[in-house]
Image (cartoon, helix red, strand yellow):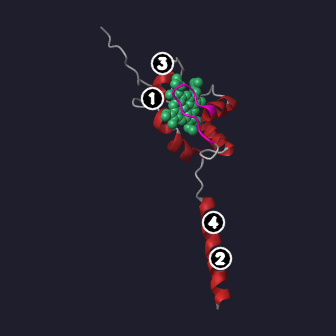
Amino acid sequence: MKIVFAMSLLVTLSGCIAEAKDQKADGAENYALMCAGCHDPGPGHPATMLLQQAGRPVPALIGRKDLELEYLRAVVRQGLIEMPPFRPTELSEAEIDEIYAHIMRGKPSKPATAIQTTKDP
Ligand code: HEC
């Protein structure tokens, strides 16, 4: 009887593990979770605002065509001025690559009107 119980427990547990694997966040979900708060288009997103100030043609990350994978990997791992770095325990190399693919698939947003430092006189 004990063995039957142990076996059924094992089956249940392995089922849970398989389920957890299936539910692993993909590039779009990780982007939404880790990057969108700062990098989405429009006002209220600090990275978009700073990148617009730096003169990027599309200040939001989604839809950028000029981003190299190696550059994005380096920025994510090391941070960049105001951007915090991400540890491998937060995002694996594969997850960074998936985020990159998600960004490349996205349609460019309209140039953000996030910044209005001065009003027209
Ligand atoms: C806390 C806000 C914040 C988060 C979260 C964040 N970033 Fe950033 N990121 C920034 C800021 C701000 C800059 C612009 C650097 C500056 O001028 O300070 C930036 C710059 C970048 C750049 C360089 C763009 C360029 O044109 O040079 C890349 C690439 C980038 N981020 C990718 C990501 C990715 C991918 C994620 C998610 C894993 C992410 N960032 C999460 C704030 C953030």
**Residue 91 falls within the magenta-colored stretch:** no
> What crowding class fits label 4: few (fewer than 14 Cα within 10 Å), some (14-19), or many (20 or more)?
few
- Residue type indicated by callout 3: Gln
Callout 3: SS: helix
- Quarter-of-image position of residue 99: top right
Residue 26 or residue 84, whichever sits in front = 84
Residue in the picture at 62% in, 72% down: 13
Point out which mark residue 28 bears: none
Q: Mark 1 and ligand 1: say if the CB distance to the nearest ligand atom is below 8 Å.
A: yes
Marks 1/2: CA–CA distance? 47 Å
Q: Earlier in the sequence, mark 1 or mark 3?
A: 1
Marks 3/2: CA–CA distance? 56 Å
Marks 1/3: CA–CA distance? 11 Å
Q: Which residue is mark 3?
A: 53
Q: Earlier in the sequence, mark 3 or mark 2?
A: 2
Q: Earlier in the sequence, mark 4 or mark 1?
A: 4
Q: Which residue is mark 4?
A: 17
Q: Quadrant of the N terminus?
A: bottom right
Q: Which residue is mark 2?
A: 11
On the question of residue 60 being in view, the answer is: no
